[in-house]
Amino acid sequence: MFKFEDDYTYLGLFYTKPSGHTEKRCRKYLDIKKLNTKVSAPQLMVVMMNPGASRPLKGNDNQPVAVEAKPDKTQGQIVALMKKCSLEYVRVVNLSDLREPKSKIFYKNIDPQDSIFSPSNKADFDEIFIKCVPVLIACGVHNSLDPLVKLAITTIGNAKIFGLKKENCTNKYYHALPRFMEQRKSWVDNMAKQIINTKVYCP
């Protein structure tokens, strides 16, 4: 169900920034587009936890423009959702730009300054975040994320927000890639239903 067909492109804006005696590898955003689409702007914004192991296919971690990126299983979930909703252009941003594939390490290194939703990164937010389309939050429910999720929702403002919320919790949205296949299918179906049923939905 979640295969990476050749009729989609994955374009990420990758960059690095100094961090002590080393540097952080980061990604500002990822665009997922259907090939030959005539849609010129994202139809849906997706907010996830962090770019994980995402990397540019040609290996340059510091690019001035978006370049082709290697897709992963989580992005396969987004493609499945795009198909169900007849969407051709989706943009993914993250609570943190930090590219750290191991969640336990990421949680210990969360820095609000790495977030597009931080006031210090307002210029990036204004340029990258499309404000007139629905927003899907699928970042996971780890407690370490709570301050960033709250910051993101505050910064997003009045946009229509979707997501699979954890019961009896505020600002906790389950990740787009659950552990089991049936849960993954259920997540896609649930999100598609939410998006298609909203009055602001325009494929």
Image (cartoon, rainbow, N blue to C red):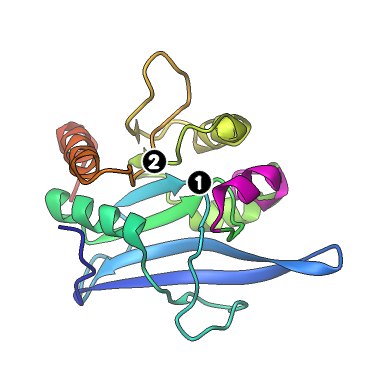
- Tell me which corner region of the image, top left, top right, bottom left or bottom right, holds residue 90: bottom left
Q: Which of 182 and 30 is in front in this view?
A: 182
135 lies above or below 20:
above
Q: What residue do we see at 32% from left, 31% from top?
A: 164
Query: Furthest residue to the bottom?
Result: 58
28 on left or right of 71: right
50 lies above or below 183:
below
How packed mark 1 is, by other alpha carbons closer than 10 Å (few <14, some 14-19, many 20 or more), is: many
Q: Disc 1 versus disc 2: distance between alpha carbons?
A: 8 Å
Q: Give the tally of numbered discs.
A: 2
Q: What residue do we see at 59% from left, 58% from top?
A: 100
| Amino acid type, residue under disc 2 in the picture | His
| Amino acid type, residue under disc 1 in the picture | Met
Q: What residue do we see at 42% from left, 55% from top?
A: 92
> Which range is magenta?
101-118
64 on left or right of 58: right
15 lies above or below 118:
below
- Tell me which corner region of the image, top left, top right, bottom left or bottom right, holds residue 20: bottom right
134 on left or right of 121: left
How packed mark 2 is, by other alpha carbons closer than 10 Å (few <14, some 14-19, many 20 or more), is: many
Q: Residue 129 carries which label?
A: none
Q: Which mark is residue 49?
A: 1
**Residue 176 belongs to the span the image colors magenta:** no
Q: Are marks 1 and 2 in contact (CB under 8 Å)?
A: yes
**Residue 114 belongs to the span the image colors magenta:** yes
76 lies above or below 116:
below
Dot 1 or dot 2, earlier in sequence: 1
115 on left or right of 171: right
Q: Which of 201 and 94 is in front in this view?
A: 94
Query: Furthest residue to the right?
Result: 21
Q: Is mark 2 on a helix, strand or loop?
A: loop
Find disc 2 in the rendering and name its residue.
Answer: 175
